[in-house]
Amino acid sequence: MKPPFSITPRMLDEIGRIERFIGRIEGLDHPKPQPHLRKSNRVRTVQGSLAIEGNTLGLDQVTALLEGKQVIGQHEEIQEVLNAIQAYDQITGFSPYSAKALLKAHRILMEGLIPDAGKWRTKNVGVVKGSTVSHIAPRADRVPFLMAELFQFLKEDPSHPLIRSCVFHYELEFIHPFQDGNGRIGRLWHSVLLYHYHPAFEFIPVESLIKTHQQAYYDSLETSDRVGDSTHFVEFALKMIHRALEDFLNQFTPKPLTAEERLGNARSQFSDKSFSRKDYLRHFRTISTATASRDLKRGVESGLLNKSGSKALTTYRFR
């Protein structure tokens, strides 16, 4: 049975934005972030997803654990981080349409934390918010069948793969197939699906953005529960994906250099050799002729440069 949802203009707008951002990523000279950014984004992913579940370890502590260092903290929280690091390290190897792979990922995430890691729940459960039950999950004996149906939808439905990934995320949380760890496995598997949509998502920390908008995340889940379909959650999730891509692209957008920074860079380039304004412009291809003239004038006035000749024959040399 196909999960209930509607395709809305807002979804299509968000998908358009996402695809434009992906096009910009593909146009980068080096679309895969440098090692320090990959590590930083992975830390934000792990810390963001676990913080939603109440883990109190911060970015510095998660970074230390990623580097194999010891940290001071509760044993269970440290184990959660180590497990999540291991699971996200394998994100490219999980088969996105395989229930067996999902069970393996859950086992990695929850190893040493619960006795039935990597197994469908065998008890009926409800989600408690405060003193009230906010969601009663389907009966435990229906979980294998419901998850098989969900994977079939994921694999065969003709809707856009981004929409399917968001629907899957919501429906997994609705089915609540595990005794514990449903939130973190839902976010992990959403990342798996996004990676298989486009490899750039391997290092894009959507989870960190969800943590920033945690209440809206919960509200969208509850709204979809209340109305009986995932449309509201899908709209929310697509917005988080497009904003995460925007943040990712900003990491590649160099900030304009100041005149002092350009002159320092030029000193390294030209050393003690004479050079002209044309040479300076050739080195800094994105600045205007007027900016180059102002830079060189500032260099002369500050005593950084010697100036020789006049007009078109003017040359400069660093002191």
Image (cartoon, rainbow, N blue to C red):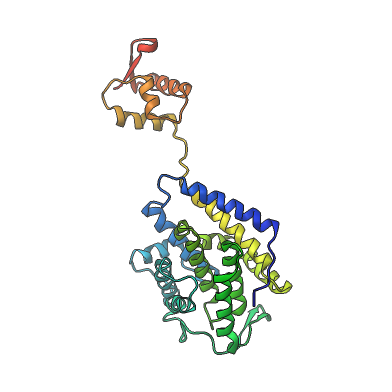
Q: Indicate the position of residue 205 as horizontal and vertical percent values.
A: 49, 59
> Which of the two residues, 153 or 137, is positioned nearer the viewer here?
153
- For the image, the number of numbered tags is 0
Observer able to see residue 53: no
> Which of the two residues, 48 or 11, is positioned nearer the viewer here?
11
Residue at the extreme right? 227
* Residue that appears at 53% across and 67% down: 190
> Which of the two residues, 218 or 9, is positioned nearer the viewer here?
9
Q: Indicate the position of residue 3 as horizontal and vertical percent values.
A: 65, 73
Picture quadrant of residue 93? bottom left
> Which of the two residues, 233 or 81, is positioned nearer the viewer here?
233
Q: Indicate the position of residue 184 as horizontal and vertical percent values.
A: 52, 72
Image height check: is 45 above or below 293? below
Residue at the extreme left? 272
* Residue that appears at 38% across and 22% down: 299
Quarter of the image with the C terminus in it? top left
Q: Is residue 48 left or right of residue 127?
A: left
Residue at the extreme top? 310
Image height check: is 278 above or below 74? above
Q: Is residue 215 left or right of residue 120?
A: right
Quarter of the image with the N terminus in it? bottom right
Picture quadrant of residue 72? bottom left
Observer able to see residue 297: yes
Image height check: is 92 above or below 298? below
Q: Indicate the position of residue 268 as horizontal and vertical percent values.
A: 30, 32
* Residue that appears at 61% across and 64% down: 159
